[in-house]
Each structure stands twice: as structure tokens, then as C-alpha cells.
Image (spheres, coloured by chain):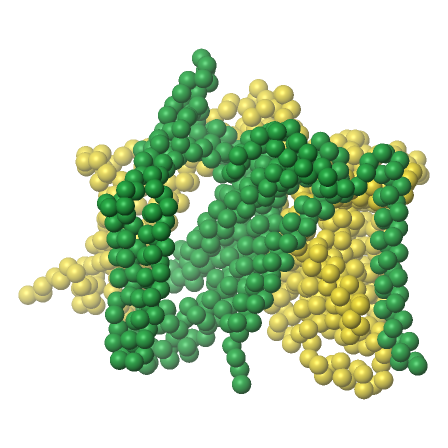
Amino acid sequence: MQTINFLKPNRDNIKNYSIFGSVLILISLIDVISNAFLKTNLTSFLPGSLTTLFPLILGLIGLNMMRIDYSGNKTLDLLNKNINTNNFNALLTLLILFSIIKALPPSLSWMIFDANISGDSKDACTGTGACWTYIKVWFRRFMYGMYPNEFHWRINTAFILVIALGFVGYFMKENLKKYLALYYVIIYPVIAYLVIYYLISGGSFGLQWVETGAWGGLSLTFIVSFFCLIFCFPLGMIFALGRRSNLPVIKYISICYIEFWRGVPLITVLFMSSVMFPMFLPEDFFMDKLVRVIIAITLFEAAYCAEVIRGGLQSLPRGQYDAAKSLGMGYWKMHIFVILPQALKLVIPGIANTFLALVKDTPLIFVVGLAELAGMLALAKTNPKWLGFAMEGYIFASIIFWIICYAMSKYSYNLEAKYKTER
Amino acid sequence: MNNIIKKFLPQILAILFVVLIFGFLTINAQTNMDNRGIDFGFGFLSQESSFDVQFSLIEYSGSDSYARAFLVGLLNTLLVSFISIIFCTILGVIIGVARLSSNYLIKNSAAWYVEFFRNIPLLLQIFFWYYAALRALPLPEKANAWFGVTYMTVKGYYIPSMVWENLNIFLYCVLAAIISIILLRNYSNNLRDIKGKQIPVLLYSISILIVLPLLSFLFGGVSLEFELPQLKKLSKISYIYEGGISLPPELIALVLALSLYTSTFVAECVRAGIEGVSKGQKEAAASVGLTPNQVLKLVIMPQALRIIIPPTTNQYLNLTKNSSLAAAIAYPDLVLVFAGTALMQTGKAIEIVSITMLTYLTISLTIAAIMNWYNKKIEIKEK
């Protein structure tokens, strides 16, 4: 007669155990699902806290029964290996599953099923779910700030032009490729600046002047991070080379610069740009607030950039320097033709990470009164017609930033993987 | 000759350049301040500040000096950084270990946690907690008790405060317990080295740590009472809790956002550290007969910590710097109190901003110096 050992399932009684175990798990899942979705408690006949623990206990017993080593069944083995190696793991698995199931209905109904998106005033929202009408009405403000509605095409055109110019490098002719670095470091920033100045600021060519105070929203985030990136890169390169220089004065100046900016929080740098910087400018010399902020963030990020580039320079083998020197190359020739092309390729992922941090830091310009996305949200939140929708606003902004940052981090991760294999 | 020029010319030019920039800025600042009738100096620090700070660790009122306001701000910054560092370490270690779990669900939940909280700007997270999540909490009169004695309300988190009698005796006992534990450890290490005998140090240490302070309660005249927060009616519709300690919502939002955000980075450091210890180490340790616990304690952790600690300290530093975002939700930290309110009142932009920056710089450089010293110390000494 076959004895059933309840504590130690093995291959002999695999069929009984796996079927019985999966039935138990199924019951526990059904209990939790009905609890969460249908709001009916199947186990209400049980006393007190046992009701809530019931599915957990049942599931644990079920998983314990299914835990059979080398069962020969591929699905079962896969399951056991991945979510059911021991009782503790099984408990965690169940807890995660149950909490996902429990959290799903309220969040789904808040975000989708009970949410409102029609209409164009606060009255359209019933208040049971999210009020996406708020986002819909304010969408243009969140994207373009207080920029006049009829001129939004200017921002769009400028962005498309700048992005298109950025891709020129890919389609350049072979014989022009050697000027690529020159293009990206010097020509591109100038062209991009001119495009943004003449299109978004306006003032000439029959375009109406829009002052920078009206710029805002997500487009401002892009403008600030774009300019900071293209300016901080060359600056960072100079300080990275300076820090590795043999000349003590230059070395220590670079070290002081880098350590100073890396040691202070960005918010104080922004305060500096807004309250302290004007004091240091000549009289009658007016500098726009946005320009001051961009200069401040550039100086700040350049220090981080410099450290990343220094990492790249350090990782090059000494032989490269020696070889270049033995060919009779001077300092600049050696760096421009031998060292930097290799080092910069190595630091692309690091630079991408710095850029990511930069994009995440741009909402801070809100503290000096420039209303990019976070600032526009704060503005919209206090609008008397739209009180009480802070949650929707911040969720919307979080989703947008999350998509941008996640895409960038994945991209930089891919770059890292790509350059790792090439070496 | 050529060489000398090559060596000195760039340096002289660099010095000239720096001097020129600084000179230019100083002259401008001088003329600007003369025109506006502002004089440079730090005398304002001893003047009466005449503004109030709503949350402060030390006694402070409007009649105190600006220097004291600076101290209040600095202490608030350090407080929020300290609490957040503790929480982000705990969370980060859990998430980092979870990312290495063999359990598919745990591994992926941890990975998504990291991706989620890392890719949302910290300022947005702070705003979310402060303006959206914490605003949804109940009013004081409707709050439910958490753990029976603490109340989470829209006006803050109220916890019981401790009223000690003869606190110093208690502290001496704790100190004595710690010293005796250190002595015990040394003794047991000696015993192990000489006679090869093991004594259960952990068990003894824990019992010493419990028993000695307990004795102070029984014989030392130490007593501890809890002052519970009590609901009090201020007017017809407004209630407030009195007694106990109240943690303002700004502090809670800040701690939540900072620790969730930084814990993702700590988790990555922890993961990298544990992954960085080669598998051979574990196998070798097991093959010489160490138990799994001993392998973890004596072989894996010392090596992993060497990789984990430097980048983690860097993250703590970032956290401390990021705590300056407190100014955005009006938590009275250094930036808000000093670079905000004090600057508005005195108009001493240059002095105040430089003091604020130098304070952060000092904190950063001190920790960096300690880290360098530590790294030198734990460096693997290769022959």
C-alpha cells in the first residue's frame, strides 16, 4: 500500500501532489481575486484574522506540495526553480502576487474606469476618479508655458530643426567626416543657438518678440538641458585635461574648480545665479534670467562632465600616450588625434548618465521663478478654477519625466554594452 | 629655453586669466555695492534676525541672531539627511539583495522599483508626497491611531515623546555595556587565536546590551514616561494634537522622497558589491568547512563592503546635497532659512550665498577626506 507522506513530496506521488497543490493555490488566488475585484469575501465564515490569512496559508501549503525536486515535468521544474525554491521564497511570491492583485482594482478604477476626460471645466469631473480633463485643458500650458498659443508652431519648428541638424552627422559625406567633431563642438551649438534665438525669441524676420519670462513647460526643460549639455561638454573636457596636466598651477586650478562645483548643491548655484550673479556684472549690463540659469547649470555640470571624461582618459593604456609621443607629437596634437578620440568614445555612456542627471535636475530652475513643467504644475495647482488636482498633475509630470529618463537610461545602457564588446 | 617657455607660459597665462576674472568680478561687485549703498561684511550675523522658524531642534525665536538662525537651518538639514540616510540604507540593502534573489517575482519587482524611483526627478517626488499624497491624509479629529499611540494627520505625524528621569545614568549604562561588549570581543578573539575555542559572542553581547540598561531602571532610579499626544479643540472646527512630538508634513515628505530616491542608488551599489565578489571565494570558503553564516560574515561581506562603501558614501553625500530641495516645500533647512529668509531681510546676497555654499562644500570635502582615508586603509595591499 502506498503511504502518502504529507511532509515530503517526491517523484513517486508527483501527480497527486501537483494536482492537489495547484488546486489549493487556485482556491487561494480565486479568494483574493474575488475579494479585490468583486468585493465579496468567500471566506467570511472563518473567524477574525484567519479570513485574511486564509489564502496565504492555503497558497503556502499548495506551493509546499508542489515543491518536488527533479520532477521531470518541465513546467513544474521551471516554476519551482524560479518562484518556489523554499518556504520563505514561496511566502514572498504569494505576498507579491496578492498585493499586485489587491492594488490593481482601486488604481485601475481611479486612473481609467472612474476617471473623467471629457468637458473643459472642473464641473466635468465627478470626483470619483482622476480628472484628466484638468490635464487636457492645461496640456498646452504644461508643454509650452505662458508662450502665446498662436506661436507654438515656432517652438515646434525650432525643435524639429535642432534635432534634424543634430542628425546631420549621420548623413555626412565620407570626406567631410573628419570635421564631425568640429561640427558638433563648435558649429552645431552656434546654429542651434541662432535657431532657438530667432525662432523662439523672435524679434526679427516679422516674428513677434516673446520674452523668456513667458517660456516654460516641458519645452523649457528641453531648451535648458540642451544648451547646458552642449556647453558643458567642451568646458568639462578642458577641465578634465587640466586635472591630468603636469603643470601644477593648471592642475590645481582645475581640481579647485571641479571640487568646488561638485561640493555644492545645484539649488545654491541657482540662488547664486539669481541673486549674487547680477552683483558681479558691470553696471547697465543686463543679462536675461534664463541665460544666467543656463550659465550656472553649465558651470555646475561641467565639473561632473570633467570627472566622467577624466575617467575615460585614465582608462586609456599608457602605451597610447607613449606611442603618440614617440611619433613626435606635441601635447595638443597627441590629444586631438590620439587620446581624445579614443577616450571620448569610452565616456559616451557616462556622459549620457550625466545628461540624464541634468534632465532630472532641470525642474529645480523652478526655485528661481522659471516655470518649467514642475513650475507650471505649481501654477496650475493654485488656479482658483482648478483647485484640488495636484495628484493628477504630479502623476502626469512623473509619467512624462519617467518616460524620458527611462528611455535615456536604457539607451545609455545599450551604448555601454555596445562599447564594452568592441574593446 | 624652449622647454622653460613651454612649461611656464601656460601656467602664467592661467594665473593671469583667473586673476583677471576674479578682479573683474570684484571691481564690478565693488562698484555695484557702492552704487546701491550696500557694504560688505559679516557683521549682520550677530544682529537680531526677527523672523520665526516653524520647526527647530534648538531654542529659537525672532530675537536671536542670524548666526543662530544659520545654526537652526544647518541642524534641520543634518536632521533630515540623517533620518533619510538611515531609511535609504535599510531600503537600499533590502532592494539590492532582492535584486539578486533567485525568485523571479522578487528580482523583477526590485528591478522595477529601482527603475521607477530613479527615473523621476527628485523635486517632482517631493512635490508629489507633499502636495498630493500627504494632503489626502485625514484631519486631526478624524485620524486613526497607528500602533495605538501615534497619529498620522494632514498636519503632521504625532508621536509620543519620552520623558526621562536620570537620563545620564541610563546613558552611562549603555556606554558601559558597549565598552564591555568590545572587551568581550577582544577576549574571545584572543581565546580563539590561542586556544581555538569559540564562545557565542553575539548572544552574550545582546544580553549585556539588554541587561545593563535594564538594571539602571531597577536600581539606578531611571524612569521613563511617555507623553501621549492628546486631541485638543482649538476652535469650533479646528483641532490639534498637544503633547508628544509632532513631525511636520514637510519633514515626512522630504524623508520619504529622499529615502525612496536614494535607496535606488544604494541598491545598485549593494548589488554591484555582492556581484563583485567572485564565486570562487564562496566555494573556497565552503570547501574549508565554514558554515554558510560564517561564509557570509567572514568571507563575502568584508570583500563586498570594500566595494559597496565608497559609492554608497557618495550617495549619502548626494542625499545631503539634495536635501536642499527642502526649500521648495518650505521645510526650514539651511537654504530656506538662510539663503531664503535671511537673505530677503538683510539683502547681503554675496555673503549669505557664499556662507551657504561654503557650508555644503565643507560637509562634502570633510566626508570626501574621510572616505579617501578609509579607502587607503582598506585597500588590498598587494605585493
The residue sitting at 77% across, 31% down in the picture is A149
Q: Quadrant of residue A181?
A: bottom right
Chain letter matching colour yellow:
A
Question: In the rendered image, which quarter contains the C terminus of chain A?
Answer: bottom right
Q: From where the camera sits, is residue A241 visible?
A: no
Question: Seen in the image, is A188 located left or right of residue A306?
Answer: right
- Tell which of A365 and A117 is nearer to you: A365
State whether residue B197 is above or below residue B90: below
Q: Position of residue B215 (x, y in %)?
A: 25, 49
Quarter of the view holding residue A15: bottom left
- What residue occupies the far top of the structure in this picture? B236
Quarter of the figure with the N terminus of chain A? bottom left
| Residue at (33% x, 35% y) in the render | B226
Identity of the residue drawn at 71% across and 31% down: B345
Give the chain letter for green.
B
Report whether residue B21 is seen. yes
